Amino acid sequence: MSMGRQLHKLHLDGFGLESLRKEYGAGETVTIRFRLFATDTDYRFFVDEKDVSFQQNFDSKGFVFTFIMPDHDVTFHMTSRNSMMAMRERE
């Protein structure tokens, strides 16, 4: 990374999301990990920015997401829902 290069913030919105750095220059590869997964839970990972497309992989430690940092801040979101619980109908 060259001196004076503008860095953009990586915001992680979800419990258990990890990245080695919190700031990246435009064009750098961002890697995010999620290791706290459960088999009875459905997860959704997403970004709001239309110019960010991430790759999702899985290794022995959990989910791995990568994308190229654009020339602005990015927020990476994770939501979860327990899929083994019975859904109750509204009365």
Image (cartoon, rainbow, N blue to C red):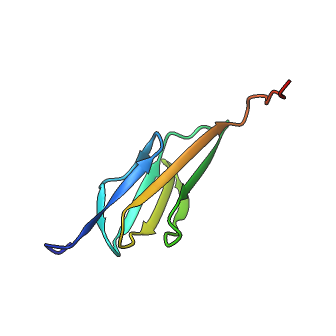
Which of these two is toward me, 80 or 31? 80
Viewer can see residue 9: yes
Q: Quadrant of the N terminus?
A: bottom left
Q: Decide: is 73 above or below 27.
A: above
Q: Residue at x 35, y 75 (%)?
A: 27
Q: Quadrant of the C terminus?
A: top right
Q: Residue at x 51, y 66 (%)?
A: 54
x%, y% of residue 33?
Answer: 44, 51
**How many numbered marks are there?**
0
Q: Decide: is 90 above or below 40.
A: above
Farthest residue, direction left: 3
Q: Is residue 17 left or right of residue 57?
A: left
Which of these two is toward me, 25 or 60? 25
x%, y% of residue 25?
Answer: 29, 70
x%, y% of residue 26?
Answer: 33, 73
Which of these two is toward me, 53 or 75? 75
Which of these two is toward me, 73 or 61? 73
Q: Residue at x 42, y 55 (%)?
A: 32
x%, y% of residue 59?
Answer: 52, 54
Q: Is residue 20 left or right of residue 56?
A: left
Farthest residue, direction front: 91
Give the image quarter of residue 68: bottom left
Q: Residue at x 50, y 51 (%)?
A: 77
Viewer can see residue 39: no
